[in-house]
Image (cartoon, rainbow, N blue to C red):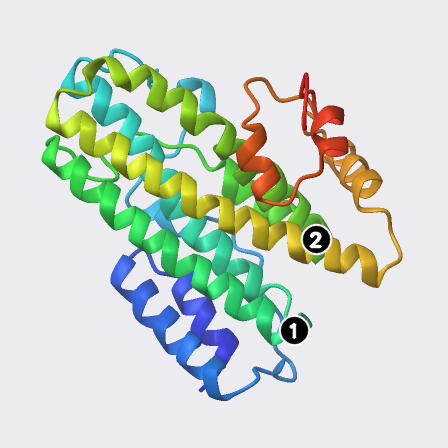
Amino acid sequence: MNFYLTIETALQSPDIETKAECCRTLLAYCNTNTPSHQEGFVPMHFANPSYASFCRIVPPRELPARKHFDTTEGLATLVHAITHIEFSAIDLALDAVYRFPQMPLTYKTDWLTVAEDEMRHFRMLQEILETLGYRYGNLPVHQGLFDASMHTTEDVLDRMAVIPRHYEAGGLDVSPQIVKKLRNQKKDPLVSCIIDALDIIEREEIDHVRKGDRWFRWLCAQRDLDATETFREILDRYALHRHKPHMNIQARKAAGFSCEELLSLGAKACR
C-alpha cells in the first residue's frame, strides 16, 4: 500500500468512517512494516480543512457565544464547539504523521493512535449533539487549528511545540472551567453526560500532550537545544501568548511540563 497517499485520503475526506478505515489500515501496516518515504512524494499544503464542505467557516469573533448552559441552544453551542475541536484534532494527528516522514516509527504509531482516540471523542460528542437536536455542521466554526497546522509544515519541532504543547495543552486549562460552569445543572442527565464526556477527554488529552512533549524534547535533544528556552522562542516567533490564565497545573505537569516552564507561562505557584 502507499502509506502516505492513504493518510492523504484520510486528511482530505470529510467522512469520519473513511478517516477511521484509513487509520486502522495505517496502524495495521505499522505493526508489520516500517513506512518509508516514497521517492517523489511531496506532502500537500492543503488549501482548506476537510470539514469545509459541510461547515460554514467564519472568523472566531463571529462564532456564537458559549453561554446560557441552562438552555438546549446554549448546551448545543458548547458541545458543537468541542465536537469541532475533536474533528479538527483527528486531522492534526494524521497530518503530524503525513507531514514528517523522516520521524521514527514510534512517532508515527503515537500519532495514529492519537487520531483513533480523537475519532472516539468525536463520536461520543456527536451522539450528545444529536440528542440535543443538532448535527456537527449545523453551527458555524473557525479554522484556527487548521491554520496553525499549515503554518507549521516546515519543521516538526515547531509542530510539536505549537499544536500539542500550546493549543492542546491550552485545552487542558479550559476543560475544568467549562465543567465548573456546568455543575449547576448536573442533575440534568444530559448535562451529567456532557461532564462525563469532558472528564474522559481531559484524561486522554493529557496523554496526547505528553506524546507531543516527549517528541518535542526528543527533537531538542537531537539538535542540542534547551527545551524550555526553545519553547519560549517558538511561541514568540508565532506570536502566541505565553501567559495562560486558569492554568491546569496538575494536568500540565502530568503531560510533561516542568515547574520552571509553568512559572514562565504565568503560573503563580508550582510544586
Judge from the rendering whether residue 215 lies leftward or rightward of residue 61; answer left or right: right
**Residue 8, position in %: x, y?**
46, 67
Badge 2 amino acid: Phe
**Residue 103, position in %: x, y?**
67, 70
Q: For the residue carrying disc 2, how many other residues have a C-alpha within 10 Å: few (<14), some (14-19), or many (20+)?
A: many
**Residue 97, position in %: x, y?**
55, 65
Judge from the rendering whether residue 71 lies leftward or rightward of residue 55; answer left or right: left
- SS category of the residue bearing label 2: helix
Q: How many marks?
A: 2
Judge from the rendering whether residue 122 lies leftward or rightward of residue 59; answer left or right: left
Q: Which mark is residue 104?
A: 1
Position of residue 48 relative to residue 2, above or below, is: above
Label 2 sits on residue: 216
Position of residue 16 relative to residue 88, above or below, is: below
- Contact between labelled residues 1 and 2, with CB atoms less than 8 Å apart: no
For the residue pair 17 and 43, the one nearer the viewer reads as 17
Q: Tell me which residue sits at (19%, 20%) in the image.
A: 186
Q: For the residue carrying disc 1, how many other residues have a C-alpha within 10 Å: few (<14), some (14-19), or many (20+)?
A: few
For the residue pair 58 and 266, the one nearer the viewer reads as 266
**Residue 232, position in %: x, y?**
78, 35
- SS category of the residue bearing label 1: loop
Residue 169 placement: quadrant:
top right
Q: Which quadrant is the N terminus positioned in?
A: bottom left
Position of residue 69 relative to residue 217, above or below, is: above
Residue 199 placement: quadrant:
top left
Badge 1 amino acid: Pro
Q: Residue furthest front?
A: 271
How far, Cα to Cα, is label 2 from label 1?
A: 13 Å
Judge from the rendering whether residue 171 lies leftward or rightward of residue 151; answer left or right: left
